[in-house]
Image: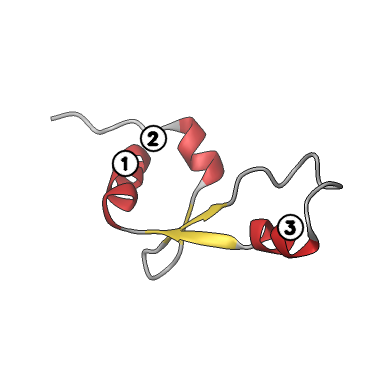
Amino acid sequence: MPKLKTHSGTKKRIRVTKTGKIIRRHATGSHFLQKKSAARKRRIASTDTLSGKQAKNVRTQLGK
């Protein structure tokens, strides 16, 4: 069985921590910020952890 290729779009957007957690950024944080509330912008600026099936699919795309 040949090695799996890494999905380029995923490797640009997703990070894997030393403990193996998968970190991603929230969407809609780069434009139309004037109409969004401060609380909403703070929530968007933070990172999110993937778990379950989503994390498994991302690991497959990253070839890990």
Q: Residue 8, position in %: x, y? A: 48, 32
Q: Residue 53, position in %: x, y? A: 27, 49
Say which of 36 and 31 sits in front.
36
Dot 3: element: helix
Instruction: Give the residue pinned by disc 3.
Output: 41
Dot 1: element: loop
Between discs 3 and 1, the one toward the N terminus: 3
Instruction: Give the residue pinned by disc 1.
Output: 63
> In the rendered image of this protein, does residue 56 appear above or below residue 32?
below
Residue type highlighted by circle 1: Gly
In which quadrant of the rendered image does the N terminus lie?
top left
Residue type highlighted by circle 2: Thr
Say which of 30 and 7 sits in front.
30
Locate residue 51 relative to residue 17 in the image: left or right: left
Q: Residue 49, position in %: x, y? A: 45, 61
Q: To which quarter of the image does residue 20 belong? A: bottom left
Say which of 11 and 53 sits in front.
53
Locate residue 8 relative to residue 44 in the image: left or right: left
Between discs 1 and 2, the one toward the N terminus: 2
Label 2: few (<14), some (14–19) or many (≥20) C-alpha neighbours in 10 Å = some
Q: Residue at x 58, y 61 (%)?
A: 47
Residue type highlighted by circle 3: Lys
Q: Are marks 1 and 2 in contact (CB under 8 Å)?
A: yes
Q: Nearer the viewer, mark 2 or mark 3?
A: 3
